[in-house]
Amino acid sequence: MKINAILFVSIGLCFSAFADGTATNEAHNLTKSEMRERVLMRTGGILLDKREAKGSLVFVNAQKRVHQEVIALQAERLERDVMFELEVKDGEPMPLKDMDTAFKKTGANAALFVVDDKTLPSMLVVPAGRWGVVNVGALNSDDPDDKTLAQRTAKEMARAISFLFGAGYALQNSSACVPITKPEDLDTILYTGLTLDIASAIQRTARDSFEIQLFKRCFYSKAYEDGWAPPPKNKYQESAKRWVDFKKDYLAGKNPQVTEEWQRSLIKEIEKMRSDMERGPTNPIEIPMPTKK
């Protein structure tokens, strides 16, 4: 799930403050995109910490009409929304009555079978059994082109997770999780992910009823500082790594060479933090007494 613009702006304003705690005029003049860029260069963006996560939902792909890559890419996207593991496994076509047994054999906490069956509706869920069905056969009833069918399948996957975990319909009409009466209704929906209200409801059910432990979100800079981040993959993660390395060297008294403005800014932040921590009886904050006019 993406961090919203408000969070980026808030963090950006914090990072752009000088040592005296007041934001610079430059920070106030930054656009949202510039503020976002500044935050990303400092933090490296968001990683999902999966080290303590447990449990999963598995998509069992038991059809050939829609390419498995479509299923895998949508599962990867939805995983960032629901914050727990979504697997994709191959399966064989089977009657509906056998799916409960097939689910139990997966070892997952929940399952959605992606099938091609003209006798079933486009989506069916059995919350008590923790499994459901996404049926591309019904989504293909009006013979759409491959791209349209792939998009319908991705949206129906999002809808199926929502209903399986009891989240139901979304508050926003732009979401895939809205009432529909025919497959063509899905074509008018642009967003294939899960909105915040739906994702939050799914996470709550996953945690409280499905025995699933969720991922945690973490800045790349924090993960790198704690020693578990993967090697940098883009300019933002490279930048965050330089910030952390410079901070470690400075705090260790190695006196790293200061050649760039971001280094001078970081030193000011560190010294300001040290000054605040050292305040006490011998170094109090001086608050001037008001004067009578």
Image (cartoon, rainbow, N blue to C red):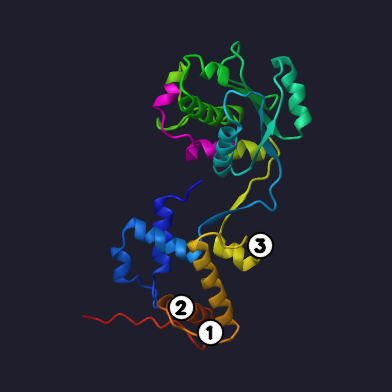
- Residue 94 among those drawn in magenta: no
Indicate the secondary structure of the residue bearing disc 1: loop
The crowding category of the residue bearing disc 1, from other C-alpha atoms within 10 Å (few below 14, some 14 to 19, many at least 20), is some
The structure residue drawn at horizontal position 64% and vertical position 46%, both measured from the top left corner, is 214
**What is the three-letter code of the residue carrying label 1?**
Pro
The reply to whether callout 3 and callout 1 are in contact (CB within 8 Å) is no
Closer to the camera, 127 or 142?
Answer: 142
Badge 2 element: helix
Query: Is 55 situated above or below 237?
Result: above
Labels 3 and 1: the sequence-earlier one: 3
Q: Which residue is labeled 3 in the image?
A: 228
Q: Main secondary structure of the magenta part?
A: helix
Quarter that holds the C terminus = bottom left
Q: Nearer the viewer, residue 59 or 211?
A: 59
Which residue in the protein does label 2 denote?
Answer: 263
Tag 3: residue type? Trp
> Residue at horizontal 66%, vertical 66%?
227
Going from the N terminus, do you reach mark 1 or mark 2 first?
A: 1
Callout 3 crowding tier (Cα within 10 Å): few <14, some 14–19, many ≥20: few
Quadrant position of residue 157: top right
Q: Magenta residues, as a range?
A: 185-202
How many numbered dots are placed on residues in this image? 3
Q: Residue at x 66, y 51 (%)?
A: 50
Label 2 crowd (10 A; few <14 / some 14-19 / many >=20): some
Q: In this figure, which residue is indicated by the disc labeled 1?
A: 256
Q: Is residue 86 visible?
A: yes
